[in-house]
């Protein structure tokens, strides 16, 4: 079973680059528009640099979007909404009123005063007067709410009232709401004389407001249908260009009218109007284009950044970042709701720069722009502007260990966009007044969104296990819980770690590397000594050495164990794997020299198992790991020197460096001979400062 799993794992390791390549290409293809691409690039105000263009087919000249929007807005503004008059509700209430009127009249007549007064009125005449009043209001229409609460009537003066199959336009002042109908009846009854509507006590008992109910309702379906029919009558074109007719000649300036014709031809061409298109060939062409771009990126990583290629999570993170950027660009272009200028493409360059390097960031960024530029409007202008902004972003954010660094990068990116956009528009329009300044709001929004890279850095760290400078600074704080524990349990080791951190950081700054990474790694490299601090000489009191009671191989095992103990502690406290690497490699595969030599002396002629006295490794594989190993050995050994002067420190450094090189501890490192020479110089200067090496004063006679 284990052998089968091992074979599967090896097969996966061989195939995963191919699988990732296929998945990336397929995912990006799904984002591409499924249409042909117009072969010509053109910009308003610039000469037509292609051959003379003749219409390949007849097509209509599209109206400018602004004109269509204006016509549509005019139709919406003049449109009169439809309301349906429900007659069944009014008939029901009138029938109810008749019954109530008869009962009320009869009840009032049974009273002496009521009988005397009502006898002077004709019941039928009075009832008909009330009925006519109710019918008049119901025929006009009663809405449930006042007119201002109907958004469809905003800025309208009339509505179309539908009664049965008859529709008529009526002014809004001729319809009622429940409130206005009630006040209208009350006003009529209060202003009338008794001979018209009967005595006042009859009005009060009838309570006419109880028969008022809404019967005029907004007909949304009918209104939308009629409005859409009216909008559909708006012509989208203004004239035709016949097949074979000259569209523009080589060298002609693309004017407003030419631009409109060219844009119309482009839209018709990409929609496949007027010419035969084999969409299977379009698909093949798009896939091949994507394959070339992604293939170039894979080749770059394989050829120049092989260590990214070999680490699955790194190459996956690059492809995922590229895909997410293209996805958002495609979403904005498809919806056409906001400008493409708002998409913060430079975040991609910033993220790749933070976790990888500047050259990789620029290469990935350019490949992304080429892919987006395939379907972005004004491809040349888009790629030109975004490329400059990306270069500025990569150059301006060398390190990000303060929030202000990212803010300044966002400012520089925004300024770049603004200046480039201004220059391009001056070239195209030749007039400052003609520049569409509204686009600057999208550029400003883009600059604000660039700061979103800060939380995205944290997300990438958690997903892929990357480590940013911000995180390194946080965990290198000596008030950190784990470092405080080391200071309390093993104060000598803690002081040693600080000295190693100072020495190593200065050296890596000189030869090039990440000073935050090596400093943090140095502070934690001996964290495992907190398990048994008394077995390490820097933590021992005078004349108290527990190794005196142990066999040499047992002592060596305890000393070696601080590496594995350190790894366990680091992972328990969820330190990044990059920091764990410092714990693993700071001794490489070297031996515990003192106990190994003492064991050989005490066991002459015996075959010694060197593995018992050797650290598990592995050996360091980067500049930071290698410099930390050297700094650790040099600082620890310098403490045992009886005489600490420049000569003795120089000899010690040479001895340790030669020993590490001869043992092959640096064989996997990328340190050059020049780097090693510079590191020796830095180490010597730092140790001289630590031990305050000065000239020897002559003694007094």
Image (cartoon, rainbow, N blue to C red):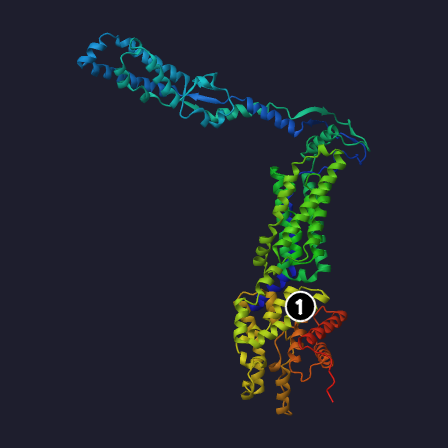
Locate residue 60, reporting x and y percent.
69, 26
Residue 143 in view (yes/no): yes
The residue carrying mark 1 is: 505
Locate residue 78, reporting x and y percent.
55, 21
Label 1 residue SS = helix
Locate residue 108, reporting x and y percent.
21, 15
Q: At 70% across and 27% down in the image, what residue appears?
A: 61
Residue 24 in view (yes/no): no
Q: Is residue 104 left or right of residue 221?
A: left
Q: On screen, 425 above or below 215?
A: below
As rendered, which of 34 and 672 lies closer to the eye? 672
Name the image quarter holding the N terminus: bottom right
Name the image quarter holding the C terminus: bottom right
Q: Residues within 10 Å of mark 1 (few under 14, many from 20)?
A: many
Locate residue 241, reporting x and y percent.
73, 26
Count up the numbered dots: 1
User: In which quarter of the view is residue 663 placed?
Assistant: bottom right
Q: On screen, 300 above or below 130?
A: below
Q: Is residue 102 left or right of residue 419?
A: left
As rendered, which of 122 and 466 lies closer to the eye? 122
Q: On screen, 453 above or below 465?
A: above
């Amino acid at each position: 079973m284990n052998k089968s799993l091992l074979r599967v794992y090896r097969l996966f390791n061989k195939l995963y680059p191919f699988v990732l390549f296929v998945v990336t290409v397929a995912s990006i293809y799904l984002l591409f528009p499924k249409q042909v691409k117009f072969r010509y690039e053109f910009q308003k105000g610039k000469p037509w640099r292609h051959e003379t263009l003749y219409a390949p087919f007849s097509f209509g000249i599209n109206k400018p979007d602004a004109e269509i929007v204006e016509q549509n807005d005019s139709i919406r503004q003049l449109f009169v909404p439809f309301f349906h008059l429900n007659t069944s509700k009014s008939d029901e209430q009138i029938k109810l009123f008749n019954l109530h009127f008869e009962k009320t009249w009869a009840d009032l007549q049974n009273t002496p005063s009521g009988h005397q007064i009502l006898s002077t009125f004709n019941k039928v005449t009075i009832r008909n007067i009330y009925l006519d009043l109710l019918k008049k209001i119901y025929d006009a229409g009663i809405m449930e709410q006042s007119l201002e609460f109907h958004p469809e009537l905003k800025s309208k003066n009339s509505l179309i009232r539908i009664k049965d199959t008859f529709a008529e336009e009526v002014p809004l002042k001729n319809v009622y709401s429940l409130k206005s109908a009630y006040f209208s009846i009350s006003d009529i009854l209060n202003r009338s004389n008794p001979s018209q509507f009967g005595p006042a006590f009859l009005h009060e008992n009838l309570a006419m407001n109880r028969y008022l109910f809404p019967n005029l309702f907004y007909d949304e379906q009918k209104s939308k249908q009629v409005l859409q029919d009216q909008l559909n009558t708006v012509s989208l074109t203004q004239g035709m260009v016949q097949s074979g007719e000259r569209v523009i000649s080589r060298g002609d300036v693309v004017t407003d009218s030419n631009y409109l014709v060219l844009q119309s031809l482009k839209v018709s061409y990409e929609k496949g109007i007027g010419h035969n298109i084999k969409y299977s060939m379009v698909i093949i062409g798009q896939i091949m284009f994507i394959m070339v771009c992604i293939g170039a990126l894979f080749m770059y990583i394989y050829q120049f950044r092989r260590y990214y290629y070999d680490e699955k999570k790194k190459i996956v993170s690059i492809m995922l970042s590229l895909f997410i950027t293209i996805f958002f660009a495609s979403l904005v272009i498809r919806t056409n709701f906001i400008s493409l200028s708002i998409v913060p493409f430079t975040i991609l360059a910033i993220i790749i720069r933070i976790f990888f390097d500047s050259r990789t960031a620029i290469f990935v960024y350019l490949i992304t722009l080429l892919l987006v530029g395939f379907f972005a409007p004004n491809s040349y202008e888009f790629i030109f502007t975004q490329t400059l902004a990306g270069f500025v972003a990569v150059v301006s954010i060398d390190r990000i260990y303060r929030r202000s660094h990212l803010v300044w990068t966002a400012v520089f990116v925004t300024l770049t966009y603004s200046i480039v956009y201004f220059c391009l528009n001056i070239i195209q329009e030749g007039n400052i007044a003609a520049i569409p300044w509204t686009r600057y709001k999208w550029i400003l929004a883009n600059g604000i969104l660039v700061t979103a890279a800060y939380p995205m850095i944290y997300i990438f760290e958690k997903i892929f296990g990357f480590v940013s400078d911000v995180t390194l600074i946080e965990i290198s704080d000596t008030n950190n819980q784990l470092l405080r524990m080391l200071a309390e349990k093993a104060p000598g080791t803690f002081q040693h770690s600080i000295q190693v951190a100072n020495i190593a950081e200065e050296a890596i700054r000189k030869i090039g590397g990440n000073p935050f990474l090596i400093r943090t790694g140095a502070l934690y490299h001996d964290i495992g000594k907190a398990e048994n601090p008394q077995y390490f000489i820097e933590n021992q009191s005078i004349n108290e050495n527990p190794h005196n009671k142990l066999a040499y191989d047992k002592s060596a095992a305890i000393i070696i164990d601080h590496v594995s103990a350190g790894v366990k502690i680091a992972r328990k406290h969820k330190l990044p794997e990059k920091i764990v690497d410092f714990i693993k490699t700071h001794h490489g595969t070297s031996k515990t020299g003192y106990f190994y030599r003492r064991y050989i002396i005490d066991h002459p002629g015996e075959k010694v198992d060197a593995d018992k006295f050797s650290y598990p490794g592995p050996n360091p594989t980067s500049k930071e790991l290698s410099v930390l190993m050297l700094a650790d050995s040099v600082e620890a050994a310098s403490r045992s020197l009886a005489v600490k002067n420049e000569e003795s420190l120089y000899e010690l450094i040479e001895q340790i460096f030669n020993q590490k090189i001869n043992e092959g501890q640096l064989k996997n490192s990328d340190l050059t001979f020049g780097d090693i020479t510079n590191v020796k110089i830095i180490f010597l200067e730092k140790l001289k400062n630590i031990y305050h090496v000065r000239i020897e004063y002559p003694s007094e006679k």
